Image: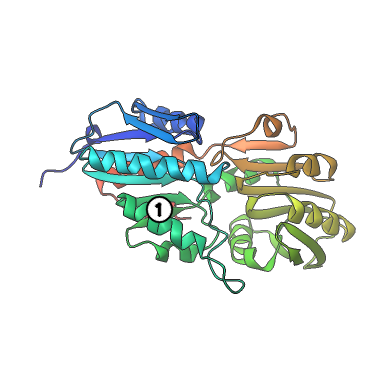
Amino acid sequence: MASRTLNDFWIFSGNSNITLSKKICEYLKMPLGGAKVSTFSDGEIQIEIEDNVRTKDVFIIQSTSNPVSHHLMELLLLIDAMKRASAYHITAVMPYYGYARQDKKVAPRVPISAKLVADLITTAGADRIITLDLHAGQIQGFFNIPVDNLFAAPVILQYIRNHFQNDIVVVSPDAGGVERARAFAKRLNAALAIVDKRRTAPNVAKAMAVIGDVEGKTAIILDDMVDTAGTLTEAVGVLLENGAVEVHACCAHPVLSGTAISRIQSSDLKSLVVTDTIAQTPEAAACDKIKVLSIAELVGEAIIRSNRGDSVTSLFV
């Protein structure tokens, strides 16, 4: 079979993050494919692909962010439309994978929603998944198709190196994030600390104590996502109580739901560095504490390598 070239693929996008999709296309120096993704008055989604994708390698960019179920349905219908239009290969590029927090049974008679979403995407016709910073790595095993789980670490690490020089401590806001925080601390040659967190109910957290020395240091909290910012703001308070000079935070996915922005604004957090896996709301864009880094080049490079059949291993840092 002849080697395939970059001319063989198309990029399409749902409505969840058009800005990121355009940035990725700018990096790839190619136009965004034409797709009408509209909604009937009753909320039913209508899809129409405007370009010929027969025998093409198709990449559909869509984060399943708020409104999560609506954006997921857009993705499923886009995949189905591509399959019925005889696309050669369909890759779902999901910078943010919604429902990832529901990756196991934590109580009787509850679904494993992350697995169900994986089944839906596969059944719709996706041949490969490209995503970033899955909340739980084992979600890759929920798919029977290849999954490239990239990490925003290169982008965030570069920002930290450029803006924080000496005497920093990388902080995991809970026990589940220790592995991620340790990897960052190792690359930054920094100390590591852990906040002992107890969750009393969904979206309700209470920070209890700090494991590790943060006194006199700049604390950088590292997490995969910030949702209601309850965990984050609790962690800020306990770190300052334990002698941290100031506290900053970094995360890949700025979910920022509910009262998250007001919590961040009223807290002692100096800055929150996020990526553009999720489109910013006007409220988030107006928050002077939030700094957005783009993962467009990272995702664009993954698309190029996937299309060419090259290894993406060097992107997994």
Q: Nearer the viewer, residue 64 or 290?
A: 64
Instruction: Give me the residue at 70% from left, 37% from top.
Output: 290
Residue found at x 84% / y 45%: 267
Q: How crowded is mark 1: few (under 14 residues within 10 Å), some or many (20 or more)?
A: few
Q: Report the residue that reaches farthest toward the front.
A: 42
Query: Can you give x and y, in whole percent of width and height, for residue 243 in the image?
Result: 88, 58
The number of callouts visible is 1
Q: Residue 216 appears in which quarter of the rendering?
A: bottom right
267 to 11, vertically: above or below: below
Which residue is rendered at x = 50% and y = 33% of the image?
42
The part of the image, by quadrant, that contains residue 142 is bottom left
Viewer-nearest residue: 152 or 256: 256
Please say whether residue 156 is visible from this viewpoint: yes
Please say whether residue 195 is visible from this viewpoint: no
Front residue of 224/248: it is: 224
Query: As drawn, which residue projects farthest toward the left?
Result: 1
Q: Where is residue 65 in the image (x, y as percent from the top left)?
A: 55, 43
Would residue 250 appear left or right of 151 to someone viewing this image?
right
In this picture, is 231 found above or below 178? above
Q: Which amino acid does label 1 sit on?
A: Ser
Measured as percent of width and height from the top left, residue 92 is found at: 37, 46
From the image, tell me which residue sits under label 1. 314
Label 1 SS: helix
